Image (spheres, rainbow, N blue to C red):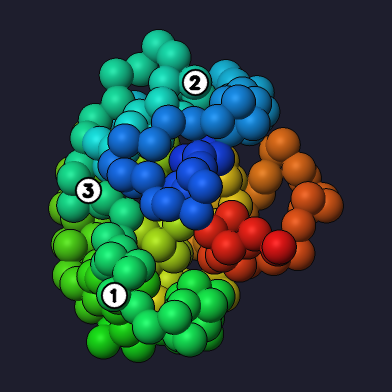
Amino acid sequence: MTRRRIYLMRHARVVYFENGRPLRPESVPLTDEGREQARATAAVLEGIEFDRVITSGLLRTIETARIVTPDAEPESWPELREIESGRLEDIPEDELERTFTEAWRDVVPEEARFLGGESIGSLLDRVLPAVDRLLSDSDWDVLLAVLHAGVNRAILSYALTGGRVLLGNLEQSPACINVLDVGDDWIVRAVNVTPADPAHLRSRLRTMEELWAEFRPPA
C-alpha cells in the first residue's frame, strides 16, 4: 500500500486585538514571536522536499509558509480560510466570555456559530470538498499545508473519523505540525507538535481562552 504524506501546520502567532478592539483578521501579520515560532518549525522540517505548499491565501498563512519553505511558491486555496467570526458587539455582554472560551469544545454542533459568525456546518461545507479535491490530484507525494486552527480541526476530525464532524478538543497551537498519511485510509501520526515549545510548557489554556484574555485582560 502506498500512502502520501501531509504536514498540516497552523500559522504562527498573530495578534487579533489591539487595546480591546478587534483587528481585521485577514490582514494581521505575524508577531516577532510568531516569526521565531515559524523558524523553529522550519528547522524541524528542513530537508523535506515538498511537492506542493498550500495556504489559505490569508497573510498569516503565506507569511508562515514563506519562512518554513522559502524556496517554494505557496498556493492559495480560499476555501481553506479560517472560519469567520461575527461582530463581537452583537454578542450580549453576559455571553461574551462563554462564547469565546467554549467555541472549540467536545463535538461542536454544525449549527454552532463561531463568535456569532460562520457556522461549523458552513466550514465543513467548504473544507471537506477541498480536501477531497486535493486528494484526487495524484500529482504530489509530500505536501505542506499551512492553515488555521478551525480548518485544521476539521481536517483532523475527517482523518480520524472518516465523517463530517468537528472535534473541538484537538488543540492547535501557533506554528504547530500535524503529520498525516493518506491512501485508501488515513493514519494520524502526530498532532499539535510545537517545535518552539516541545513540552507545551508555555500554556495550559485553549487558544480561545488565550484570545479571551487578550480581548479582556485582567483589570
Is label 1 in a helix, a strand or a loop? helix
Question: To which residue does mark 2 refer?
Answer: 67
Kindly report the distance in space between the C-alpha atoms of the residues bearing marks 3 and 1.
Answer: 37 Å
Question: To which residue does mark 1 refer?
Answer: 90
1 or 2: tag closer to the N-terminus:
2
Q: Is residue 87 left or right of residue 101?
A: left
Label 2: few (<14), some (14–19) or many (≥20) C-alpha neighbours in 10 Å = some
Tell me which residue sits at (44%, 14%) in the image: 70
Tell me which residue sits at (49%, 73%) in the image: 100
3 or 2: tag closer to the N-terminus:
2
* Residue 124 visible in the snapshot: no
Is label 2 in a helix, a strand or a loop? helix
Tell me which residue sits at (23%, 70%) in the image: 118
Which numbered disc, 3 or 2, marks the residue closer to the eye?
Answer: 2
x then y, percent, for residue 207? 58, 61
Q: Amino acid at mark 2?
A: Ile
Tell me which residue sits at (58%, 63%) in the image: 216
Kindly report the distance in space between the C-alpha atoms of the residues bearing marks 3 and 2.
Answer: 23 Å
Which numbered disc, 3 or 1, marks the residue closer to the eye?
Answer: 1
3 or 1: tag closer to the N-terminus:
1
Residue 47, image quadrant:
top right
Q: Amino acid at mark 1?
A: Asp
Kindly report the distance in space between the C-alpha atoms of the residues bearing marks 1 and 2.
Answer: 37 Å
Residue 186, image quadrant:
bottom left
Label 3: few (<14), some (14–19) or many (≥20) C-alpha neighbours in 10 Å = few
Residue 152, image quadrant:
bottom left
Q: Is residue 40 above or below residue 123?
A: above
Which numbered disc, 1 or 2, marks the residue closer to the eye?
Answer: 1
Quarter of the image for the C terminus: give it. bottom right
Q: Amino acid at mark 3?
A: Leu
Question: To which residue does mark 3 refer?
Answer: 134
